[in-house]
Amino acid sequence: MNSINSCNVNQTMRAILKSTLLASLFLLLSVNFVHANALESALIEGVKFLDDVPEVEWYRVDGSTLIIGWKGIPQFFPHTNRKAAIRGTITTGKKVQVWAVRHNQKKWAVGNGDPFICSVSAKNGRVKTDTCPYR
């Protein structure tokens, strides 16, 4: 009789532990998703000025990375990429990487081996690296 009760207690404890672990995992993933979404929203807010740049065909945010699709290279090209990186890091409080690509490279992604025009990284409101050509 004791072994039956002991077995039932063990099964109950395992079920409780499993439920607790699953709930904790779900909560942790939810918090991470909300944080990532808030980071991306803040970055988008910081670079809204890109909407008014005629040569910027599109831009997209992936975490703390901003990818800008340029249609042509205007005279203020390097300044705009730097400005986007600086504003992005100020609004997010995180390091931001800006990648400039051609407007027809909508599926471009970091690390996929496709060519890009240049990149700028910024942290704490200051540019850390910049490969954009100056005119």
Image (cartoon, helix red, strand yellow):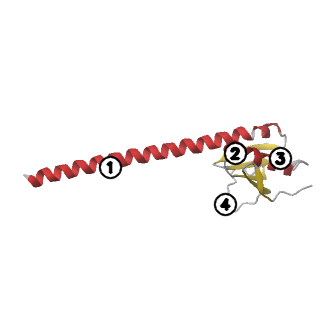
In primary-sequence order, the first of circles 3 and 1 is 1
Image quadrant containing the C terminus:
bottom right
Q: Is residue 84 visible?
A: yes
How far apart, in angstroms, are the residues tagged by discs 3 and 4? 24 Å
Look at 51% across and 43% down and name the residue there: 31
Label 3 and label 1: CA atoms lie apart by 51 Å
Q: What is the crowding at mark 2: few (fewer than 14 residues within 10 Å), some, or many (at least 20)?
A: some
Of residues 5 and 74, the one nearer the viewer is 5
Whether residue 72 is visible, yes or no, is no
Residue topped by disc 2: 60
Q: Residues within 10 Å of mark 3 (few under 14, many from 20)?
A: some
Kind of residue sitting beneath label 2: Arg
Disc 3: which residue: 80
Residue picked out by circle 4: 112
Is mark 4 in CB contact (under 8 Å) with mark 2?
A: no
Circle 1 sits in a helix, a strand or a loop, which is it?
Answer: helix
Q: Which residue is mark 1?
A: 18
* Disc on the earlier residue, 2 or 1: 1
Q: Position of residue 57 (x, y in %)?
A: 79, 43
Q: Amino acid at mark 1?
A: Lys
Disc nearest the viewer among 3 and 4: 3
Using the image as rendered, state which of residue 86 and residue 124 is in the foreground.
124
